[in-house]
Image (cartoon, rainbow, N blue to C red):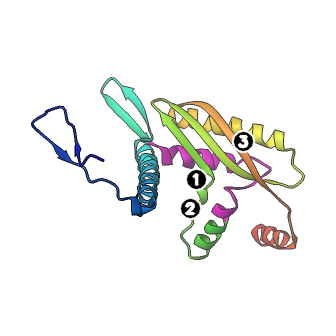
C-alpha cells in the first residue's frame, strides 16, 4: 500500500495514512455514520432554509409586498374552521399539544393543521382536519376547499393552485359536548 497519493502537481505530495488491517472495518463504520449524520443535518438545514424562504411576493409599480406563509396559514385556517361539519384542524399530536397550550392560555389555533407553500404569487395549501360524525366527507372537504381558495385569493391576491386535504379523524359528540353547547348558549 502506498502512503503517498499523487496530485495534479508532481512537486506536491500528500500523505495518506494506510488503513491498518486490524481495524476490522471500524473506520468504514465510523465513516458511514458520519456520512449519514451529514446527510440528515443537510436535510434539516434545507428544510429550515426552505421555511425561511417560503414567502409570497406581490409586485407593484412603486414597490413589492411580501406575504409570510404564516399569514396565509392563518387565513386558510380561519376559513376552514368556518365550514359547517369541521370540528377541528390538525392531526392527533397537534391537537394534544394544542390542548396543553390552551390550558395555560397560549393557544392560537387559527393556523394549526395548515401548511402553505408559497412561490411568488401562487400558493399550495395543505390542511389536516377532523370532521363531525354524520357529515358527508366529500361535501365538507369540497366546501373547505372552496372557502379556503375564496378567502386566500380575495384577501391576499394570491392564486391558490391546490388545496390538499387530509381527513385525520371523525369527532363523535359526547355528553360533555352537550354541556359545553348549553353553557355557550347561556
Q: x%, y% of residue 116?
A: 55, 42
Name the residue carrying label 1: 111
Seen in the image, is 34 located left or right of residue 85?
left
Q: Position of residue 105 (x, y in %)?
A: 56, 73
**Marks 1,2: beta carbons within 8 A:** yes
* Nearer-the-camera pick, 123 or 18: 18
Residue 108 got which mark? 2
Nearer to the camera, 147 or 19: 19
Q: Is residue 98 left or right of residue 186?
A: left
User: Where in the figure is residue 186, as x and y percent of width and height?
Assistant: 77, 71
Which image quadrant is residue 101 in?
A: bottom right
Q: Which residue is at a point 61% across and 75% down the rendered structure image?
A: 103
The residue most toward the bottom is 104
Q: Which residue is mark 3?
A: 144
* Furthest residue in direction left, as rendered: 11
Q: Residue at x 35, y 59 (%)?
A: 20
Secondary element type, mark 2: loop
Q: Say which element carries label 1.
A: helix
Q: Is residue 45 above or below residue 7?
A: below
Q: Secondary structure at mark 3?
A: helix
- The magenta span reads 68-95
Real-space Cα distance between discs 1 and 3? Answer: 14 Å
Q: How far apart in space, not on screen, are marks 3 and 2 (Cα)?
A: 20 Å
- Tell me which numbered mark, 3 or 2, is placed earlier along the sequence: 2
Amino acid at each position: 500500500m502506498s502512503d503517498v497519493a499523487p496530485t495534479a502537481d508532481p512537486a506536491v505530495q500528500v500523505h495518506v495514512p494506510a488503513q491498518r488491517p486490524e481495524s476490522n472495518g471500524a473506520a468504514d463504520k465510523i465513516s458511514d455514520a458520519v456520512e449519514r449524520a451529514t446527510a440528515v443535518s443537510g436535510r434539516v438545514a434545507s428544510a429550515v432554509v426552505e421555511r425561511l424562504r417560503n414567502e409570497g411576493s406581490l409586485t407593484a409599480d412603486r414597490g413589492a409586498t411580501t406575504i409570510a406563509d404564516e399569514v396565509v396559514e392563518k387565513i386558510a385556517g380561519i376559513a376552514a374552521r368556518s365550514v359547517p361539519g369541521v370540528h377541528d384542524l390538525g392531526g392527533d399530536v397537534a391537537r394534544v399539544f394544542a390542548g396543553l397550550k390552551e390550558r395555560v392560555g397560549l393557544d392560537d389555533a387559527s393556523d394549526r393543521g395548515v401548511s402553505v407553500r408559497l412561490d411568488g404569487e401562487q400558493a399550495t395549501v395543505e390542511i389536516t382536519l377532523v370532521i363531525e360524525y354524520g357529515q358527508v366527507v366529500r361535501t365538507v372537504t369540497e366546501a373547505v376547499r372552496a372557502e379556503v381558495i375564496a378567502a386566500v385569493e380575495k384577501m391576499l391576491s394570491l392564486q391558490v393552485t391546490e388545496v390538499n386535504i387530509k381527513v385525520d379523524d371523525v369527532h363523535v359528540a359526547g355528553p360533555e359536548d352537550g354541556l359545553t353547547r348549553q353553557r355557550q348558549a347561556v
